[in-house]
Each structure stands twice: as C-alpha cells, then as structure tokens.
Image (cartoon, rainbow, N blue to C red):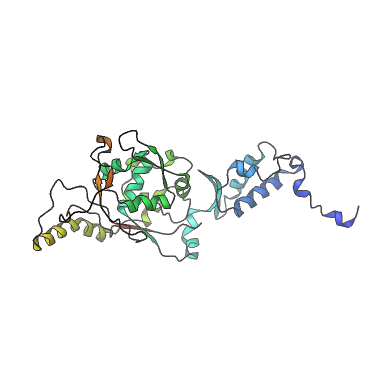
Amino acid sequence: MHDDDAFDTDTATAPVAQADQGLINRIVEAALLASAQPMSLAQLAELFPEDRPAPEGSLDLALEQLAQACAERGVELVEVASGWRYQVKPDVHAWVSRMWTERKTRYTRATLETLALIAYRQPITRGEIEQVRGVAVSSNIIQALEEREWIRVVGHRDVPGRPALFGTTKAFLDYFGLKRLDELPPLSELKDIAELDPQLPLPGAPLPARAAAECQPDAEADADAEAAPADDAASADEDGEPPASPDSPPAQDAPDADGDLPPPATQDAPDLDAPAADAAEPTDAPQTDAPASTTHQEDDADTVSSEHKHE
C-alpha cells in the first residue's frame, strides 16, 4: 500500500456502524456548533449517508452525553421547539452579553400585552384581544410581531368577515427556550407584564421570569401614562373642544417606541357585523371631521427595556 493511502479521503463515507460512539458525538457536536439554528434529530441523521445511517439510538446517546459534558462549562445543550442547540448559560450571560453593544430594544406595554394574550389564549382574533384589553390594537403591533416571526395566522374564525386567528410560532418558543407552550409559566403566577418580555438577556433562557428583575418597567413612565388621559382632557377644554363621548370607539394603541414602523393612516373601527365574540374586530374606517377622541390611549413611555438577542 502506498504512503498516500495512509489518509483515506473516503473515511467520511465508511460504514458508520464501524465507527465508535465518540466519533458520532464529535460529529453531532460540530454540527450543532456550526449551525446558526437548532437542529432536529432528523436533520442530524441527514449528516450520514442514506446507505450508511447512524446506528439506531446513537444520536440520542450522543445528545445525552454532550449535554452531560456541559455540566461544568459555560454553555449548555438544550432542546427547544425546533431541535437541539448550544446556548450560553444564564449564570454567565451578564459577562458574555458585554460583547455586544447594540442599542437596546424597547417594547411598549401594549406590545407585550398583545403577545401575552396570543401566547396564552391562542388561537385568538384581533377583536378578542381588543375586548380583553379594552383598546383597539394597533396594526403596527400585529405587523411587528409577525415580522419578528413570533406570531402567525393559524386560521380564520367561521363567522361573518372570517377574522384571522393568531397563534405563536416555533420561533417564539425557541426565543423563550421552550419546547412546548405548556412550559410557559402559569398566567396566574405573573405579577407584572414585564415578566413576559420577549427580548431575554440571551436567547434561550429557561424562563422569561429570569429576566424580570432586569426588565421592570419605569415607575415614572407608568405615572406619566396614567396621567396622560387627564392631561389630554384638560387641553381639550382649554381649546374649546368638546369632551369625548362615552360611546367613542376604543382608543388606538400608540406605535412602538422604536419607531420602526409608520403610524397607520386611519384608526381601526369595530366591525358591527361580527358576532359578540368578535364585535371589536377592526376594519378600516373613513376619516371624518369629527374631533379627535380623548379616550384613554396607552403611552409609549411605558416601555420595557431588554437586551438584543444574540443569534
């Protein structure tokens, strides 16, 4: 045999059954580190040729052993909705997060409340969200959540108008580090909406509550938001404008503080043709010369700060 044959380029296609478990472990570990997204068992199995698949149970064993090997390391191997991935452990994220200096993302309370209702009561229509919150849901909020791939349309309610039903996505679960929706903390245990902040310190923290201490809303902003309706009413009286009627439609949510999206051209109005469950389903209402409503409007100042996710 020639010396050139000492390194066989066909080693990668050698029968995997002859390879030891250590090699399979290294293959799986390298693939997970190289992948930008979680990998499922099916995707890991595709790393091996169809005619020479990985021995049955070897991939599960590899994942188990790799997870155990992370006990004393700064990373952990976890399973989320889309598959398996390595992620920074929560106890060291404060130091690792200093590697990134991007501007913190700010979310309004309206955005967090809308996301929470979709997560806990899905499938749910926009009108049902408005009935619970008591104000009209801004189109910007729905659009922003869809663009971030945290929610999607999962169907349509079988009522006149066929309003869209919204639900969360696998990307939403991955972002929270969850495998299933039933791993969300019980809604009754959430003391503040800030605990539902989707922008965790680092992707994949076991529970949103871990970020609660760092994501408490600004108390002064809360006070300003509560005072906003009274200030608006006083201003209207000084200008000679009549006060808003009690029958005025729900106030429109203000756009997110980021200002990533322009405000809607018109305010959404309730769909009068929809049944009671969807009575608040919004439709585009024409603009009129009537005075602007001074009903309660949520203040963008009530926002929740958190750090960007590291892909």
Q: Position of residue 291 (x, y in %)?
A: 15, 56
Q: Nearer the viewer, residue 175 or 261?
A: 261
Q: Is residue 137 visible?
A: yes
Asked if residue 143 is positioned above or below residue 184 in the image, the reply reads below
Q: Is residue 275 left or right of residue 24?
A: left
Q: Nearer the viewer, residue 205 or 151?
A: 151
Q: Position of residue 288 (x, y in %)?
A: 19, 54
Q: Is residue 243 left or right of residue 125?
A: left
Asked if residue 20 is positioned above or below residue 211 in the image, the reply reads above
Residue at 63% of width from left, 44% of height from top?
Answer: 44
Q: Residue furthest right?
A: 1
Q: Is residue 197 visible?
A: no
- How many numbered marks are there? 0
Q: Position of residue 196 (x, y in %)?
A: 37, 49
Residue at 22% of width from left, 60% of height from top?
Answer: 224
Q: Is residue 294 left or right of residue 99?
A: left
Q: Residue furthest bottom?
A: 101
Residue at 17% of width from left, 48% of height from top?
Answer: 248
Residue at 48% of width from left, 62% of height from top?
Answer: 95
Q: Position of residue 7 (x, y in %)?
A: 82, 54
Q: Residue furthest top?
A: 158
